[in-house]
Image (cartoon, rainbow, N blue to C red):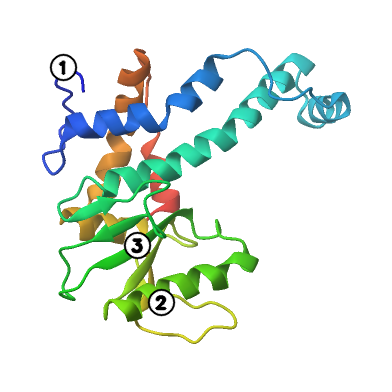
Amino acid sequence: MSDIHHGYGLDWIDEDALYEVVKHVFENSIEKAKSSKLSAPPDPFTIAAQAVLFGQPADSMMAFEKLRGVNKTISNAVGNLHQSVLGLADGWDNLGSNGGVVDLIVHETPYSKPVHVEVKNRYNTIKASDEKDIWDKLDMLARTNASVSYLVQIVPKVPVRYDKPWRVSGRPERDNVRCCDGATAYTWAFGRETALEELYDVFPDILSDVIHSDYDKSGMMKYYSISMP
């Protein structure tokens, strides 16, 4: 870890550890963003269609294609970011990508038993065909530990907080298999009502520090209010 202290005004989290998390999870995204190469040859018909329909030069559409190629890597990094940041909370252990059957385990809970947590970046990240398998896994862990399990959906379908049984087609609704939005999860983890909003506010600053650049983040908070409760 760097000897430089990184301060972002967040007194509820280890800011140096937070910086290292952002640096680590976005490592591949940074490299791809720097590269001038596309991961696959562009479809010239798509380039032409985009250029005509959006009224933009073909070169602009090529830049868009590059961005689109990197976007999947960035999206995966954001998902890993939330898992890793929640893992910095007291009593929350990040099990990593190969550490276990779920993303996190929470030791300090009102249930006196560990709570297992799966984190997804959006409410619709899980394919319908996979929902039953994940529900079964969370149900098994909850019953085995006489506790509850959670699916955390960082970006909810509508900007409303919730903590409720996770309803999956073909499975019974049970109180021990629950889902909640990201803001609720961050409040639970860090004991701060606005933790996720505060993280979003400084996230551009942290990422800018990682890549050693200045970025004007003015106007960015409106996008948080559109999607988050």
Q: Which mark is residue 117?
A: 3
Find the distance from the CA under tag 1 to the CA under tag 2. Answer: 44 Å
Instruction: Give the residue at x 15% y 64%.
Output: 108
Which residue is under mark 2? 140
Q: Secondary structure at mark 1?
A: loop
Question: For the residue labelled by badge 3, is the local secondary structure a helix, a strand or a loop?
Answer: strand
The residue under the point 42% across, 48% down is: 98
Q: Position of residue 7 (x, y in %)?
A: 16, 26
Q: Amino acid at mark 2?
A: Met
Q: Position of residue 223 (x, y in %)?
A: 44, 42
Return the residue nearer the eye: 156 or 89.
89
Disc 2/disc 3 C-alpha distance (Å): 13 Å
- Nearest to N terminus: mark 1 or mark 3: 1
If the image is split into quadrants, where does the C terminus sit? bottom left
Residue at 50% x, 62% y is 157
Residue denoted by label 1: 4
Q: Secondary structure at mark 2?
A: helix
